[in-house]
Amino acid sequence: MKEVEFNLLDEPWVRVLCADCTVREVSLMETLLHAHEYKGLAGELPTQDVAVLRLLLAVLHTVFWDHDANGMAAPLTDPNTALVRWRGLWRQGQFPEQPIRDYLVAWHERFWLFHPERPFWQAPDAKKGTDFGAKKLNGEIVEGEHKIRLFSSYSAEEKEELSYAQAARWLVYTNGFDDTAAKPKTKVLPNGEKPKSMKEGWLGRLGLVLAKGDTLFETLMLNLVLLEDGEKAWRQPRPYWEQSNPNYGERNEVPVPDNAAELLTLQSRRIILQKEGPKVIGYSLLGGDFFEPQDAFCEQMTIWKRQVDKKSGVVSFEPKKHDSAIQFWREFPTVFQSQEKNPGIVQWIVKLQTARILDRNRMIRFEIVGTRYDGTSSHTVEDTFSDSLTFHTALLDELGRRWRQKITEEIGLCEKLAKAVGNLARNLDIAASDPDHASKKNSAKAAQEQFYFRLDQPFRRWLCDIDPAWDGETAEEYIRQWRADAKRIAQTLGRQLVDQSGSAAFIGRMVKSSSSKASDKETYYSAPKVYNWFLADVNRVYQK
């Protein structure tokens, strides 16, 4: 058996989408040097693409902290230099070959997938950890020994073994998105304290947000945040593979990283792959490095939620996960119009646009990626999801502030329309003498989801077509047209709900008030009457 095999700088393992829309596997070196020729990453899952993207970004941060766009040695220590450097790379349209090649060749020994001392992204000490089969490593299956997934896209031997290229991709993914199924091996720390319980991988705890370009080069550049929160320069990069003595301790709490490369290569898990012949058949795993998420503003790819300590009144922020049931445009206020803490990637794009490095007329696309874990003690991955939103870059700068406020206002009014639709569905159930309270609640929720589904594409088109350069009259007319469309969509759905409510709802019934102050009062519910209430609610939404 070979002790040294499959170097990620030379062997094909990164899946990319070519210009002709075919998918191919290329080496890490080729991915960076030819990024301008590919449309983007094309891994098995969007979450896997994010994990691989962050690995690529760690390399770029390390290389271009030390070198400028021309390959000249020049440490990046101040904000103005960062913007000049980013502009130089962006205008070239592709990454300069020599500094990237020189750096990766210098660290070639640290990129072997199988190595007796330093296997890439792995820890030999993880052999004492929890053992899993290859089907648990494969994020498309996420199947344990005692939990069989129905309708799997893999079967027979495909489940039990992975190629080296597959294993490399899922290794990077698992480090960021792993669940908590692994059993702790360390019971007591050297100081006598019990170790903290293991959480999901760092990326699994985030509400991930990233910018997308027309090519992989543009995507990498847009997410190459050379200034933390668009303001201050990072400290010198310290990616994982450069560490001379990496910490292999289980569930090891580390300081919040002060440089992008260290954060992007955080080892949330200690993993060691197990191979048999030319295939990976399993792996062993322990909990790895972690830090507390509160105010961890080094992370540039997440949305944040505000928290106030009840005792001290101290305000802090921690990553906020996305809800897979909510479309991205409904999160617009949280991502782009937060009054307190916007994602770092958004602040970076604003910085580039304000500095006139990005064209104000350029369309920008943001993507959110998320993982939903189940409610079991293992927090097994239940689903992964992604969504994207495209609009004018100028919406993000100071001149676009008024439009961001208007968009936020329109989303709030859409929420009121959805509430009116939900009330109609619940009242129709009452009119039909449905005694099940839970059923009324479920019908209201289903009606609201249907309304948002019908509103989804029209709102995306409306947002995409907004031009912040419009004069006031044109802008107001555009908003009036949207409100008419939203109102029409709500009323059309309302009529359909009434048509489907049945004869019992049309006949109606008297219902006693649930209020303790008027327990003897009765109200007549029927389909025509509650529909009139609904129309009044809809009209009140846009009354002002």
Image (spheres, grey):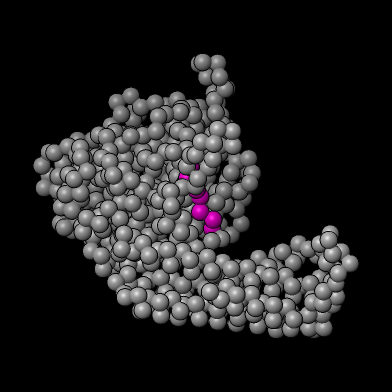
**Where's residue 532, x and y in %?**
69, 81
Q: Is residue 12 visible?
A: no
The residues colored magenta run 318-324
Q: Is residue 397 visible?
A: yes
**Which of the two residues, 363 or 213, is positioned nearer the viewer here?**
363
**Which of the two residues, 298 or 156, is positioned nearer the viewer here?**
298
Residue 480 in which image quadrant: bottom left
**Which of the two residues, 363 or 39, is positioned nearer the viewer here?**
363
- Residue 296 lies left or right of residue 98; in this view the side is right
- Residue 524 lies left or right of residue 106; in this view the side is right
- Residue 21 lies left or right of residue 306; in this view the side is left
- Residue 505 lies left or right of residue 115; in this view the side is right
Picture residue at 40% right of the left edge, 70% below the top:
463
- In this view, the residue farthest toward the right is 520
**Where's residue 378, x and y in %?**
60, 41
Compared to residue 431, the image places residue 402 above or below, namely above
**Where's residue 173, x and y in %?**
43, 46
Picture residue at 42% right of the left edge, 57% below the top:
337
**Where's residue 500, x and y in %?**
71, 81
Picture residue at 75% right of the left edge, 65% below the top:
439
Is residue 64 in the magenta section?
A: no
Compared to residue 489, the image places residue 260 above or below, namely above
Is residue 319 in the magenta section?
A: yes
How many callouts does the rendering have? 0
Compared to residue 371, the image places residue 523 above or below, namely below
**Which of the two residues, 486 or 207, is positioned nearer the viewer here?**
486
